[in-house]
Structures are given as structure tokens and as C-alpha cells.
Amino acid sequence: MADYAPRLRKLLLEAGCRFVRQGKGDHEIWYSPITERYFVVDGRIKSRHTANGVLKQAGLPKAF
């Protein structure tokens, strides 16, 4: 099964989003200048739907 987290992080960085801090467990807190909101990125994302949901929260189009 694929792990979408590395590719997702790369897309977020290219869009200008930034890592803010470590959350609970393997979760990370990120900030999007597009939506001006904070959002959570799981350390291991196995579902493309979850990965696309994170992109939506960041204000980016679907990529998976």
C-alpha cells in the first residue's frame, strides 16, 4: 500500500505552506498562507482521499 505523506509534504512546501510544529504522535501541524489556516498532516497517509483532503484544507487542488 502506498504512503502518500512524502509526496504530500513536497507539494505543500512547493505551494508555500510551512511546517509549524510536531503534534501528538506522528502528526504534524502545518500552516497555509493560501487559506491562512493551520491544518494537521498525519505521518503516514495510506488513503488518497485523506491526502486530497489535506490538500483541500491547504487550498490546493487534488493531486492523488
Image (cartoon, rainbow, N blue to C red):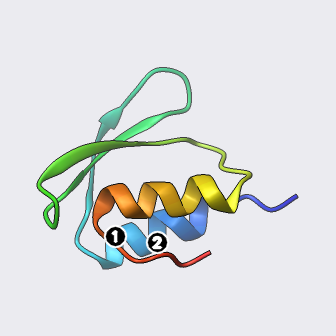
Residue 29 in percent (x, y) is at 33, 39
User: Tag 1: Cα neighbours inside 10 Å, few (<14), some, or many (≥20)?
Assistant: few
Q: Which residue is mark 1?
A: 13
Residue at 71%, 54% in the rendered image: 47
Q: Is residue 32 above or below residue 44?
A: below
Residue type of the residue flagged with mark 2: Lys
Residue 28 in percent (x, y) is at 42, 38
Q: Which residue is most to the right? A: 1
Residue at 37%, 68% in the rendered image: 12
User: Tag 2: Cα neighbours inside 10 Å, few (<14), some, or many (≥20)?
Assistant: few
Q: Is residue 33 above or below residue 38?
A: below
Residue 38 seen from this side:
yes
Q: Is residue 28 above or below residue 19?
A: above
Residue type of the residue flagged with mark 1: Leu
Residue at 32%, 43% in the rendered image: 39
Position of the N terminus, as image quadrant, is bottom right
Q: CA distance from mark 1 to mark 2?
A: 5 Å
Foreground residue among 30 and 39 = 39
Do residues under tags 1 and 2 come within 8 Å of each other at their CB atoms? yes
Residue at 56%, 59% in the rendered image: 51
- SS for callout 1: helix
Position of the C terminus, as image quadrant, is bottom right
Residue 4 seen from this side:
no
Residue 62 in percent (x, y) is at 49, 75
Foreground residue among 33 and 26 = 33
Q: Which residue is most to the top? A: 24
- SS for callout 2: helix
Residue 40 in percent (x, y) is at 40, 40
Q: Is residue 47 above or below residue 26?
A: below
Q: Image check: 43 left or right of 31?
A: right
Q: Which residue is mark 2?
A: 10
